[in-house]
Image (cartoon, coloured by chain):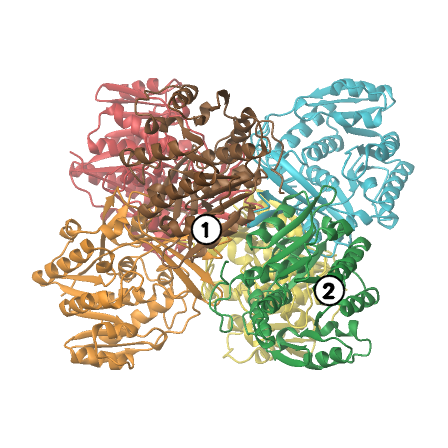
Chain colours: A yellow, B cyan, C green, D brown, E orange, F red
Amino acid sequence: MIDHLVTFGEALGVVRGRELSRASTAELGTGGAEANVAMAAARSGTPATWLGRVGDDAFGRRVVRELRAEGVTVIARIDPLAPTGLLIKELHPGARTSVSYYRRGSAGSRLDLDDVAALPLTPTTLLHVTGITPALSPEAREATLTAVDRARALGATVSFDVNHRSRLWSAEEASPVHRDLAERADILITGLDEVGLLLPRWSGGSAADAVDALGAAGHHHVIVTAGGAGVAAAEDGERESAEAVPVEVVDTVGAGDAFVGGYLAGLLRGDPLAERLRRGAVLGAAACRHPGDWEGATDLAGVGDADGDPVIR
Amino acid sequence: MIDHLVTFGEALGVVRGRELSRASTAELGTGGAEANVAMAAARSGTPATWLGRVGDDAFGRRVVRELRAEGVTVIARIDPLAPTGLLIKELHPGARTSVSYYRRGSAGSRLDLDDVAALPLTPTTLLHVTGITPALSPEAREATLTAVDRARALGATVSFDVNHRSRLWSAEEASPVHRDLAERADILITGLDEVGLLLPRWSGGSAADAVDALGAAGHHHVIVTAGGAGVAAAEDGERESAEAVPVEVVDTVGAGDAFVGGYLAGLLRGDPLAERLRRGAVLGAAACRHPGDWEGATDLAGVGDADGDPVIR
Amino acid sequence: MIDHLVTFGEALGVVRGRELSRASTAELGTGGAEANVAMAAARSGTPATWLGRVGDDAFGRRVVRELRAEGVTVIARIDPLAPTGLLIKELHPGARTSVSYYRRGSAGSRLDLDDVAALPLTPTTLLHVTGITPALSPEAREATLTAVDRARALGATVSFDVNHRSRLWSAEEASPVHRDLAERADILITGLDEVGLLLPRWSGGSAADAVDALGAAGHHHVIVTAGGAGVAAAEDGERESAEAVPVEVVDTVGAGDAFVGGYLAGLLRGDPLAERLRRGAVLGAAACRHPGDWEGATDLAGVGDADGDPVIR
Amino acid sequence: MIDHLVTFGEALGVVRGRELSRASTAELGTGGAEANVAMAAARSGTPATWLGRVGDDAFGRRVVRELRAEGVTVIARIDPLAPTGLLIKELHPGARTSVSYYRRGSAGSRLDLDDVAALPLTPTTLLHVTGITPALSPEAREATLTAVDRARALGATVSFDVNHRSRLWSAEEASPVHRDLAERADILITGLDEVGLLLPRWSGGSAADAVDALGAAGHHHVIVTAGGAGVAAAEDGERESAEAVPVEVVDTVGAGDAFVGGYLAGLLRGDPLAERLRRGAVLGAAACRHPGDWEGATDLAGVGDADGDPVIR
Amino acid sequence: MIDHLVTFGEALGVVRGRELSRASTAELGTGGAEANVAMAAARSGTPATWLGRVGDDAFGRRVVRELRAEGVTVIARIDPLAPTGLLIKELHPGARTSVSYYRRGSAGSRLDLDDVAALPLTPTTLLHVTGITPALSPEAREATLTAVDRARALGATVSFDVNHRSRLWSAEEASPVHRDLAERADILITGLDEVGLLLPRWSGGSAADAVDALGAAGHHHVIVTAGGAGVAAAEDGERESAEAVPVEVVDTVGAGDAFVGGYLAGLLRGDPLAERLRRGAVLGAAACRHPGDWEGATDLAGVGDADGDPVIR
Amino acid sequence: MIDHLVTFGEALGVVRGRELSRASTAELGTGGAEANVAMAAARSGTPATWLGRVGDDAFGRRVVRELRAEGVTVIARIDPLAPTGLLIKELHPGARTSVSYYRRGSAGSRLDLDDVAALPLTPTTLLHVTGITPALSPEAREATLTAVDRARALGATVSFDVNHRSRLWSAEEASPVHRDLAERADILITGLDEVGLLLPRWSGGSAADAVDALGAAGHHHVIVTAGGAGVAAAEDGERESAEAVPVEVVDTVGAGDAFVGGYLAGLLRGDPLAERLRRGAVLGAAACRHPGDWEGATDLAGVGDADGDPVIR
């Protein structure tokens, strides 16, 4: 039995808008994959905790406020020596987005073993980690591996979303770490374009093919997302897939996180595999309708057969 | 020993701005005295819980989000049959504000004994109530009195802020209820212009005079606020006062609530009386610098000797 | 001969926008079915008068300003004891809209016989009423029926638009009143989904079917609107219909009112039935292009064969 | 007895804001001295009519909408061949304003005898003209003089506000026309800095001195405004003055028009001279609190002893 | 060999937006065909100079700032006696735009021989003129013809874009001037709907037909644009055409100027004819995606096979 | 004789606003001390060049656009591997500002000897450097020293503004570098609170005292700024001082840079020392009236005896 979700990582301030080289104003928000997952899960009714570091600045306060506002329990260390990381998103006509990161030396990248020691892990925890955190710094990498080991030692469940960030490290650097984490995790989530980082001999194929290949490599609970081409999954031999839910796309950043949040919330609720995929697909599609990283997933009106806002509980 | 603050009442959506009869847009926010108190206390580092009802609508979600964002624990019943109450604030040149309320039949006014039963009261609770809630509806009045009685039966501490609202009920209707609550409360907070509602023979005077008169009437822990003329208090025979902290005033709505939140947070921390008054005066002054009801109290930069944001804990 | 339109009812302030639980700002406007009809008619060149009550507040002033700005003659009683009613509109992705009303105890709901006495009725008046006003309060119901009777006694023409509001009263309560008003009216306007409220044995069908059925029930001048499926009408045996004009829909609230305003303006001008339907359909389609309740109907550029703004006269 | 105010002239679209060479957006409004006067008078409860020409464009529609919204009766000829005139106002720090006019060849400058023929003049009319209209074009000059003569022939009252615009014509060109109009008018209103245009031998002095000098020159009803130095007046031998009402000044453009509107409204109401001056001074001061040309005069909250909005009647 | 582009004409301030008769705000920008061409060329990497007159006002400063910001060398005479010309653009639903010009007597229309004397012409200059400048005033017409003659005398290359503006002069007035300039120019650019102004016997046809007809009339280097129907060209007997690049259109004003800027930049770079047309078509399409006159052409992301912003050099 | 100003350093994107932890939007701008100096000088009519590196992103394009718009010649290397540095400015009530920098590893911090090689130095150049650039990275420090040496070798003039940034390096690290640059510079500019970094035995005093002490230490041309307490200077034995110009302060960031730009522009024009100080004080005061880093210095209306905008030349 799993009864709460715990995740950690770097949450970011977001400055986004059109024509940032000329406009007088931009919109403000927050992002970060693990924070996005926690918010999507909490909105879906799951107890969710996010742990991380933020700077002693406005974006740090914003990150904490937004996570709390969405019902996530926040364990945040304020780092007086480093600023909260930033993401600049420029939206172009035609639903194209350019991004710049400011996370080098950021508070969130300085996550370390002291932070991990504060994780509220129990045997009924689902600990969710991504491949972004180990890319941030050597300390953050050590923290990630230690957290996973601690969770496993306690008998907790571990999920891992590859989330390769080519701006933070190369495929060569990242691949061994991704494989290591994938092996230690109970649940493996990967984009179809990331499968090659996990399976050196992977020569391409559909999401369902990738699920089979990862199963053959010993992963018992695998989800492979393929954006507009939908998602496939296998759990202890059961195979399911779901189509992407059609929506008018504004920005796809954060859609994968919303999917994961919905999927894991379903797992905590005890939903069957197909229902988890469907819930994830609805949240992922909704996230695409908004220029922010997670905000779209709070309004499901008219996405597939969903009807309105996820309830506040 | 007191270790957490619990309060309940109606929280409101706020639509505010200048020239609302002509402007294209207005600003959105939230308000409600008890919610404001809880936020000011939580920002000051005190565990704080707010309980209330909201409608199944955007302003209800906003109220819950903002309280959570500020670190308040929220126990909210979603009322599917009534909208969240609203406050319209029009700001005029010269720091003048006009307000209209839309709270007749609102979700928040339908608070009842079922809600009170959900209050997390213990012997170490400080239960804070105001004179607004009993004005909302007969059920809300019964709920208020029952909550106070339950708290007292448990040995909890009760504070009562008169907060007379002449738009909701007349002085004649309100006065007996105010007096009843004042007698049951351990801590009595009142505006200088409300003293006559508590003491029929009160013929005016300073805040210090009012503290003496209320002490003579048997109230052992009394705070009398007088806006720009400062505040006076007495606790078990100790007398203190504090001057108002000078700031550039934008809107005074919510300043009293910020004062109360700061004062009660000091009480929970074990601060001496003078320090509690000073903290309250700083928060109240800060609240006046912002057109919103509580937002100003989150930024203390340059208010008296305060330096910067109250820390997020 | 009819030479001026007179209508009365509750006009509302409107606060509208996206993401109202999170956004910093919202847009302001006005609404109310009868006010919308009067504005659409006045824009179409018809002398039009609106009578109602507003509060002594910014939204009341806004309602009066906007009606006058659109060329409507306003007879407004300022009610010092009640606020102007409000409509909150949240727009979701995909042209979906959520609404909340704040009209319980509002100034507009307090319309009474004194107000009706001020209606400028003559034998050449077209008095337009809706089924919303009798739902607001017992006084407003009495006022509606009295106004219709006074108009008929003078030989004026009466039009009635059913406009059932399920949030204000149940079908059971509403149906006898709707039928009563339909019988007293010379012109009956109804949505296809409201026909069952007028004809207890109605088992569904097209707008043309409903026109026939209402004709069989004794209504000589009937218009049945069916949203995107167009509109059908009969007048003294002549039957006509019009297709909906295709536009990119932003929000459909107020489209019916724009249709009615255009139709009635055509009637005053002496346009033939088919032309009235077409004008109504153009205005209704234009209203759907704007998030506000009536503003879209002021810009007909590119709607069907219309070309630009309705002229200011 | 005078029972309605009639005025005519050019009304303008206004584009205003800070940093117009860099800002992404500016605010929109309307202006024009005679329109401003009519709005201030109508807001004060006086029946007021404005006549003029506007282009078939958005600013023309805006001018008509705003005048109507403020309760002014509008008689506007739509000129398909010329645009509505424009005023660009750039606000600088420190309450300084730069203005640019775009009124050469504008619709409003093409006012002619046909327009004047449409003026609703009666013996009880107060016709108000300014020295701006004759500066716009030869036709407009002829129209102004003809209107004044027609009014006088009917026994109507004529007021004239000098309003010299040095950007439109030189003092040499303007002075004879100003003197001509001053002689034909029953009521003469002038700025202290314009007195030299009326009295060639004027060598300076206070507003009271100017009132005396103009009285000696045969003007029986004279008002001289001196901005922050107040206003002086004489009517049939009675002398009065009023101090300027202190307010926080944002922009002084339009303050004189608001003064005139308030003064003339008082005249129509039969207020004594001193009361008219006070009302004018309050409206003028209120106009200074807003960056727009007339909008400030709609909110009197806290201006002198005024309390809140002028009532809508 | 051509190594720099020189152009001159009137640059305008732009005020644009939706619902300008009601909105509180509008967006600010700049425009003017020659300025737009210079910016598109400079963004494409070509040395470009714009010469003109602006008023001593905010829009004049804006024009100079924007041209410089885009990398254009500016030679501007500040005219203290006339304002910078203005363009008001109202955008309607459905990508429709209404425009009003305020350029009568503007600084830009007062361009004269003194200005022309300041043109930095050399034998390797490409001087670009349009048919708008000779329509502005007699002096501007003389200046245009003189500039062309001077350039030809130096051995420079001259391009002429017809750009007929029916609001500034009639076809009868314009046609001889257009023909005169077309004959003196080395490169002739015309819209398909303008061909009749150049060829009196033109009875219609495709862009390719027009290229042939103009070739037969003696023009050796001709480009004919046909909006959504693409563009055709011939240069010294070589014939090419390009289809319009499909984009979501917001406003087409300025698209032709962007095309010309891209085409001429290609010419300076020595690109082949087909490549010049393609580059022009991409810039023209991009310009349609933005409500401003030139801003869209700075972001080519997703337009045809273009990838991202034109580089700043 | 000096005829042009050359400067180099890191220019930054700026995101600024109030309540950045809660607001929906923020304002965008640019900053960086050397860029600010170049803009203030160019606005004052001095030929000015800025050299630096920017990222291939929106803020990089913004920096280039703004410098060019203000008339500065830009020599910018686009660094594809690093983002443009950022400055986040939060404005608090009471003219207080909090700042966060994101410049670690930024494009601007990667300035190196290749960039310095591109500086357009001649014997008549005034090369201006600050103490910020050597704090950015070892390469940038080497570049700064090399540039100064190259300029001196050519016989150019060098000015150095200390500009100590305690967030970038400690006083211990910085002091030797500051002293080294001060010794090599012809003109030394320092804040009064930075004098101790230059003179180890400095025990405090007025700006005039500091000028004397620095003169005694061998600096022949010294300017010491003291914020609201004015400025003192000495040049070859001549001593002058200027008081600060009183303005309503919004944000003081950038005021020193505006002062320096004005002072150096005066030097290039050949203004006497007192006039240079006055011009600098006016620009510095104007910069304080705007929340941006340099924008205030473009509008001198009402600052001291200045009148309006610095002319565009």
Q: Nearer the viewer, residue F223 or E220?
A: E220
Which chain letter goes with mark 1?
A: D
Picture coordinates of residue F66, whole percent (x, y): 34, 48
Identify residue for label 1.
Answer: D118
Residue C200 seen in render: yes
- Residue B175, picture quadrant: top right
Mark 2 — residue? Answer: A268
Residue at x-position 81% and y-position 33%: B159
Q: In this view, does B310 lie to the left or right of E289?
A: right
Q: Nearer the viewer, mark 2 or mark 1?
A: 1
Kind of element beneath mark 1: loop
| Disc ID at residue F102 | none
What amino acid is found at the position of numbered circle 1 in the picture?
Ala
Residue F277, compared with residue C207, is above or below; it is above
Q: How many numbered marks appear?
A: 2
In the rendered image, residue C241, in percent from the top left (x then y), is placed at: 62, 79
Seen from the viewer's position, the closer of residues B163 and B5 is: B163
Q: Is residue E248 above or below residue B273?
A: below
Q: Is mark 2 on a helix, strand or loop?
A: helix
